[in-house]
Amino acid sequence: MELRGVVKILDQNYKVGDIVKAKIIVIHKMDTGFTKDKESGKQFPRFYMKEITAKYNGNVIAHFDLDVATSQNPVIQFPLKVTGPGELVVDFVNSQDDTAQKKVTITPAG
Amino acid sequence: MERRSFIKGTFALATIGLLNPVLFRHDLAAEEAVEMPYKELLDDYLRGRKAEDGSSIMKLNIPDAPENGAVVPIEVTIDYPMKSDDYISNITVLTTKNKANKAISFDLTPANGMAYLYVNVKMGQTQDVVILAQTNKGKIFQASKNVRVALGGCG
């Protein structure tokens, strides 16, 4: 299954040395395994987003271990210190080991 | 003879199953629901250490009574200098009365510049949100907030 996600930098104008916030949105179910289908009575299997790793110019700067208590279509914001122009690469892994990768370029002004 | 070997076979399988719960647990964890009681998760995080009261340095921005328990925004800002040798290395968000209580564990580095996390969690009923933060030296801070949920979002 293809995973869908978005990564963006929330601040518009930033310089080297500023702390900006990055936002990650993943379109993904977070089934706990406890819920049942109302019509068929079948239990939905446990199916969730498991890991998100953010790399900034090759260095891992944020690692998230998600679990089923995170809401559906998880939204995460985290801080990031701008050290220069580069790329923020975010890898997603779900509980069935499907992966996806999203990138956003960081271009500080001035 | 066939019956005997059959019994032997099943017995051997059962023993392997008993001796290797981890081996089978892996498959279980992927598909079936796993209950994660709050106490177990907390003990696992603390590992015998004591958590300090972090309510003075942690700023929590959590609604008192969210409209929907399925999406409760949690915003944490920790007032802690992110020096290269003394920084917050992990922020974990737990709930207390869901069936599975672990929401997220965030590993951070001094490259983040500040300790901040925003995440949405699910809540089945009125309960506490517990935020645990750990420094790279093993110090643990804890803060919590009670959240009233009218419409549960966790099956």
Image (cartoon, rainbow, N blue to C red):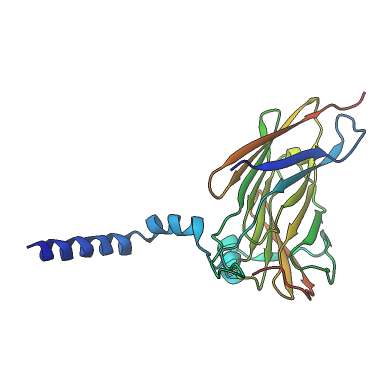
Furthest residue in direction left, as rendered: B1
Furthest residue in direction front, as rendered: A39
Residue A57 appearing in the image: yes
Q: Residue at x 76, y 68 (%)?
A: B69
* B16 shown above or below A61: below
* B27 shown above or below A8: below
Nearest the camera: B102 or B90? B102
Where residue B72 sits: x, y (%)?
78, 63
Q: Quadrant of the C terminus of chain A?
A: top right
Q: Quadrant of the N terminus of chain A?
A: top right
Q: Residue at x 55, y 70 (%)?
A: A41
Where residue A29 sits: x, y (%)?
65, 54
Q: Residue at x 85, y 66 (%)?
A: B63
Nearest the camera: B56 or B143? B143
The quarter of the displayed image where residue B37 is located: bottom right
Nearest the camera: A7 or B2? B2
Q: How many marks?
A: 0
The quarter of the displayed image where residue B85 is located: top right
Locate residue A91 relative to residue A40 in the image: left or right.
right
Where residue B133 sits: x, y (%)?
70, 57
Where residue A65 sits: x, y (%)?
62, 51
Nearest the camera: A82 or B50? A82
The quarter of the displayed image where residue B113 is located: top right
Residue B109 appearing in the image: no
